[in-house]
Image (cartoon, rainbow, N blue to C red):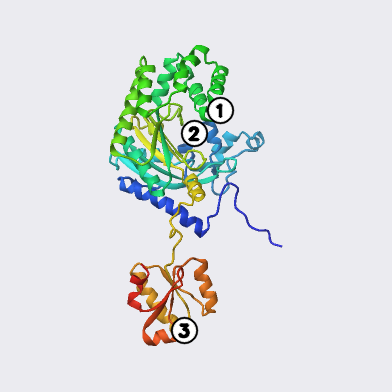
Amino acid sequence: MAVKPTIPKGTRDFSPLEMARRNYIFDTIKDVFSLYGYSQIETPAMENLTTLMGKYGEEGDKLLFKILNSGDFMKDISDEEAVERNLPKLTNKLSEKGLRYDLTVPFARFVVQYRNDIQFPFKRFQIQPVWRADRPQKGRYREFFQCDADVVGSDSLWNEVELLSMIDEVFSRLKINVAIKLNNRKILSGIAETVGEADKITDITVAIDKIDKIGIEKVNEELLSKGVSEEAIRKLQPLLELSGENEEKLTALSEILKDSQTGLKGIEELKFVVDNFDSLGHNCQLDIDVSLARGLNYYTGCIIEVKALDVEIGSITGGGRYDNLTGVFGLQGVSGVGISFGADRIYDVMNRLSLYPEDVTENVKVLFLNFGEKEALASAKLVGKLRKEGISCELYPDNAKIKKQMGYADSLKIPFVAMIGETELQENVVNLKNMLTGEQQRIPAASIPSAIL
């Protein structure tokens, strides 16, 4: 018995129904990106390892999929090196390329490579798959899509405001109720300065990021275990208990961080973004969250995270401001800010809440049944005319039993069936059946477009 074929763990096949739903999400995001003036680019699935290595830290380097060199990839490996099994050294000789780990590093490479050909500020979006050699588990895949939008070459906080408006627009269109959580890296630095533990900013932010999961008491215990002094923990308590409206939080933060110039700068930036976003109007909930860290070593200003309100799931969008995206490739001083929609998690939310439009899976609008050679030819000619008018339709290819042909239309949820039999052929009409209501009408062929709208 033949072995049933499978796919690698951490990857997925998508059926026509699943693809229709995913494309609805992708098309919605793409439309909003374009509406806001972002231009689409694409980068290769594989990059030179010199581009990728060292950009994600030691653990990230381990999760890169390396591609073996073409031909005799062992030709430069001596017997001694093979026995020694020094993997980093062997990798440099076995592989020159790897699959992209994210869209950010390839984008940085793109900006530097084409810096003389692009206009700054440069607004780009990408919707492409990325790969990570991670251990597959629920919600974590080795191949998945990212939907990124970034603007580089501008320090203006209006870019942050615009990105928030884009987030609000996307989720309004998808009918997902969300809360956008905002923070600023400078506020986090100011907090660490104010409590006298500037060198422990990472330990502090990692701990307070867990408040929702483990509570304040456990956070305090973790801080103590990391060597944060009891006095510093005492000073942190008003921040851990911060509540109220955004304006109240900003006022409280201004008082708590009054002796930190860095912290006050972060508050000023956050207030600008919040006030202007509110002035423009939005549907989503907007919350200042001082526990939000997201890639502390990466972001330098505003930090953004989006949570779905009606489904228990992780972040479905994230992003923020970074000051030196292109520095790793030798082009200094190019600031940027960007967001990334988690398409796979958004897909899970949409499925759980059944938020897709009824016609999202509709592909073919009209199926012409096949009653024989002459009738099929007449139907095929009409199919061609309708396609030129932008109406998706098809002719059933075989002269099969009508029950089978109708079953085909029903299984694919095709809303209309057109029948041209011997009588209809003689009278130059079409018998059109609405598959939802069961209603049938004999109409001139030219009337089909108006009848199916």
Of mark 2 and mark 3, the one earlier in the sequence is 2
Point 51% across, 31% down: residue: 57
Residue 122 visible in the shown view:
yes
Q: Position of residue 136 (x, y in %)?
A: 59, 43
**Mark 3 closeness class: few <14, some 14–19, many ≥20 residues within 10 Å:** few
Q: Which mark is residue 56?
A: 2
Report the residue marked by disc 1: 214
Tag in front: 2 or 1: 1
Q: Nearer the viewer, residue 343 or 7?
A: 343
The mark tally for this picture is: 3
Residue farthest toward the top in the current orientation of the protein: 231
Q: Amino acid at mark 1?
A: Ile
Please identify the quadrant where the N terminus is shown: bottom right
Of mark 2 and mark 1, the one earlier in the sequence is 2
Point 31% across, 48% down: residue: 35
Report the residue marked by disc 3: 373
Tag in front: 2 or 3: 3
Of mark 1 and mark 3, the one earlier in the sequence is 1
Q: Position of residue 390 (x, y in %)?
A: 35, 67
Q: Position of residue 355 (x, y in %)?
A: 46, 51
Instruction: Name the secondary structure under disc 1.
Output: helix
